[in-house]
């Protein structure tokens, strides 16, 4: 819910001011919608001008029937007769409200103490004594579980003993309410603490509600004055929020790579100079190798080095990363010298994520998104044993978290070292070889047919595409040649999407993965066969490959889905905005409707 009052005392009509070609309120509405976190987004307003503006732009707006003193009352009136569990308020004058902040405030309702929480809100660390003393800044103090104890315009706590280390927090006006909580607020009269401090949320405390506070340190841009608006316009020009689709990307590449049959045996020599005293190397190894003693003998464990076997039964999860990190921290006093991942895309992604999380606080779920990682990861090495995903070269690690499936995409994600030894892929089964190989083929197709394509990604994409045709359609290659070429196709396909993006098959595959747990490569193939409308020539080639290798693509996986599951699947797919923008351009929503995706999924 975005409460939007037309008359603002300090800057009248500010919500209708122009921000990069659209009114501020439309920007805020679009930003909230683009997070894909909500079932519905509404603007609630007292103004016909705002109502019309939102409606004419295809958005949903509600008129307040009554006069209201505050945004909470306006929201309460709007949701009174709606069937909702949780309502989030987004400030109308904060067009850059980030997805991360909203996601954080929502995530507590999936946490261990969710039952106790009536509402949740954000707080930001403050350090400047002037700000701590400023009555316009509302301070908050919390108990050991981050439940609010009190809000005040006074500095709380009062620093009687200057030697006690204390962190001050400022309250940010973003809330997620359970419906009962906001309805109670609406019905219950104001009491004296609220009245004297002029702070709305004190009413909840005065009536015994539990407010869970969440720390969020990034600062938003609030538009309170014409100067703020000028600054926001400049900001908008300089960078798109999140920087995902920037025209120019400055991304790191894997700095060291060794290639060739037998190159795996160089591992010990590569690691030696990186070894730190008392700090082990941790080897994450696909458990398919658990009984392969001949292979394991080629990995030399020294001192306190440790090997952990990783099951690939499920796609990597944030909880799995967190528990691996916890175990490593519990067992060793020093941070490891490095993490070595040996396996397919699953193990590559886990190795990247674990190396990041050993150097950064909190849960890996906090870092799902673009450029949220603050500290450099510890040294990490990737050794693929199956080819296709490009995970060995990419800047992301795809994880399923409590709220969504999304990569930790950062400059610190890529490996410091990769070993490409085609011999290691020898034991891969025919079907698996095909599914993972098709991930590479589909990366190329989606990159080469996308609107983000430039000469950089085209040069990698075309090479990888040709290699795939040679591997999967010609009969001219020996097995060893084919393995080596697929390893390089995977690498080039990964490089190609680094500067472009994947497309329709991946967006739909994410939906299948989220709801049914379908593996990435299999999901891509299930989707791709029905995408002739988007990639006709390549879907035909794909079908030829399927036939030539006599592979069975699972059929009918969506036929028993409930409507609810189908809706979630569509939500997840629709939420992959950069993928759709790449596939179909800015106007993608004209082609891709929920009905369209439903029809496509029903075929699968
Ligand atoms: P995978 O890692 O799950 O491996 C597939 C199967 O092959 C597993 O059963 C594994 O045990 C087996 N296997 C691997 N090497 C083998 C060998 N040498 N011999 C015998 N069996 C072997 O599958 P994948 O397709 O490589 O990776 C899929 C994962 O990669 C997904 O989780 C996906 O999200 C991720 N991915 C990441 C990126 C990225 O850029 N980070 C890109 C694409 C996909
Ligand atoms: Zn992929």
Image (cartoon, rainbow, N blue to C red):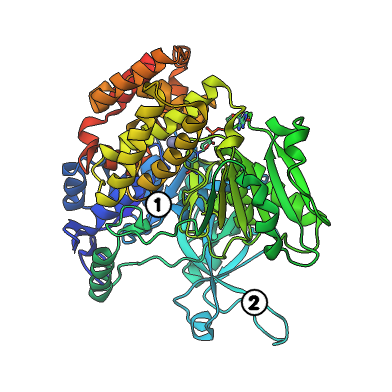
Q: Which residue is mark 1?
A: 73
- Which one is in front, 372 or 488? 488
Answer left or right for 308 relative to 106: right
Viewer-proximal residue, 67 or 449?
Answer: 449
The residue carrying mark 2 is: 157
Instruction: State the image coordinates of residue 537 (x, y, percent, origin top left).
Output: 24, 24
Image depth: mark 1 or mark 2 in front: 2
Which residue sits at x=65%, y=57%?
270
x and y, in percent, of residue 113 in the image: 67, 46
The answer to whether 536 appears left or right of 314 in the picture is left
Label 2 environment density (alpha carbons within 10 Å; few <14, some 14–19, many ≥20):
some
Q: Describe the element under mark 2 as helix, strand or loop.
A: loop
Vertical order, 236 against 228 (above or below): above
Residue 163: % across, % down? 72, 86
Label 1 close to label 2 by CB (< 8 Å): no
Work out which quarter of the rendered image holds the C terminus and state it.
top left
Q: Secondary structure at mark 1?
A: helix
Mark number displayed over residue 312:
none
């Amino acid at each position: 819910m975005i409460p939007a009052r037309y008359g603002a005392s300090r800057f009248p009509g500010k919500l209708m001011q122009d921000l990069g070609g659209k009114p501020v309120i439309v920007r805020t509405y679009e930003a909230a919608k683009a997070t894909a976190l909500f079932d519905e987004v509404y603007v609630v307003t007292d103004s016909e001008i705002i109502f019309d503006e939102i409606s004419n732009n295809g958005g949903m707006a509600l008129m307040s029937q009554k006069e209201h003193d505050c945004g909470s009352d306006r929201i309460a009136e709007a949701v009174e007769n709606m069937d909702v569990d949780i309502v989030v308020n987004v400030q109308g004058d904060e067009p850059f409200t980030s997805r991360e902040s909203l996601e954080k405030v929502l995530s507590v309702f999936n946490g261990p103490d969710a039952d106790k929480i009536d509402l949740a809100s954000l707080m930001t660390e403050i350090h400047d004594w002037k700000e701590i003393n400023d009555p316009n800044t509302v301070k908050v103090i919390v108990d050991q579980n981050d439940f609010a104890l009190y809000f005040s315009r006074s500095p709380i706590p009062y620093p009687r003993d200057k030697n006690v280390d204390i962190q001050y927090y400022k309250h940010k006006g973003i809330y997620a309410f359970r419906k009962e909580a906001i309805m109670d607020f609406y019905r219950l009269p104001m009491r004296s603490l609220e009245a004297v401090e002029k702070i709305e949320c004190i009413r909840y405390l005065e009536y015994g509600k539990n407010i869970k506070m969440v720390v969020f340190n990034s600062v938003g841009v609030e538009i309170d004055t014409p100067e703020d608006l000028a600054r926001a316009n400049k900001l908008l020009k300089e960078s798109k929020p999140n920087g995902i689709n920037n025209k120019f990307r400055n991304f790191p590449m894997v700095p060291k790579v060794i290639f060739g049959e037998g190159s795996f045996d160089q591992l010990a020599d590569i690691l030696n100079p990186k070894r730190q005293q008392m700090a082990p190397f941790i080897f994450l190894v696909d458990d398919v190798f658990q009984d392969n003693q001949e292979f394991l003998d080629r990995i030399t464990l020294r001192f306190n080095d440790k090997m952990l076997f990783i099951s690939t039964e499920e796609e990597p999860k944030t909880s799995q990363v967190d528990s691996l990190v916890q175990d490593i921290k519990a067992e060793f006093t020093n941070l490891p010298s490095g993490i070595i991942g040996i396996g397919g895309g699953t193990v590559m992604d886990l190795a990247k994520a674990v190396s990041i999380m050993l150097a950064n606080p909190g849960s890996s779920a906090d870092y799902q998104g673009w450029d949220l990682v603050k500290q450099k990861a510890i040294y990490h090495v990737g050794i693929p044993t199956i080819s296709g995903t490009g995970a060995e070269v990419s800047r992301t690690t795809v994880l399923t978290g409590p709220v969504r499936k999304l990569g930790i995409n950062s400059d610190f994600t890529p490996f410091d070292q990769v070993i490409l030894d085609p011999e290691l892929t020898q034991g891969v089964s025919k079907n698996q070889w095909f599914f993972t190989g098709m991930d590479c083929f589909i990366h190329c197709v989606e990159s080469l047919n996308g609107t983000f394509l430039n000469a950089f990604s085209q040069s990698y994409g075309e090479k990888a595409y040709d290699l795939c045709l040679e591997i999967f359609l010609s009969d001219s290659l020996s097995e060893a040649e084919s393995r080596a070429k697929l390893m390089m196709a995977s690498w080039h396909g990964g490089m190609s999407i680094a500067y472009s993006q994947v497309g329709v098959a991946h967006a739909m595959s994410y939906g299948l993965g989220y709801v049914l747990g379908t593996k990435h490569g299999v999901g891509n193939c299930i989707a791709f066969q029905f995408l002739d409308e988007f990639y006709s020539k390549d879907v035909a080639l794909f079908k030829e490959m399927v036939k030539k290798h006599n592979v069975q693509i699972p059929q009918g996986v969506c036929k028993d889905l409930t409507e609810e599951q189908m809706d979630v699947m569509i939500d997840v797919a629709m939420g992959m905005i950069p993928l759709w923008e790449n596939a179909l351009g800015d106007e993608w929503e004209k082609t891709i409707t929920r009905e369209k995706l439903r029809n496509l999924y029903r075929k699968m």
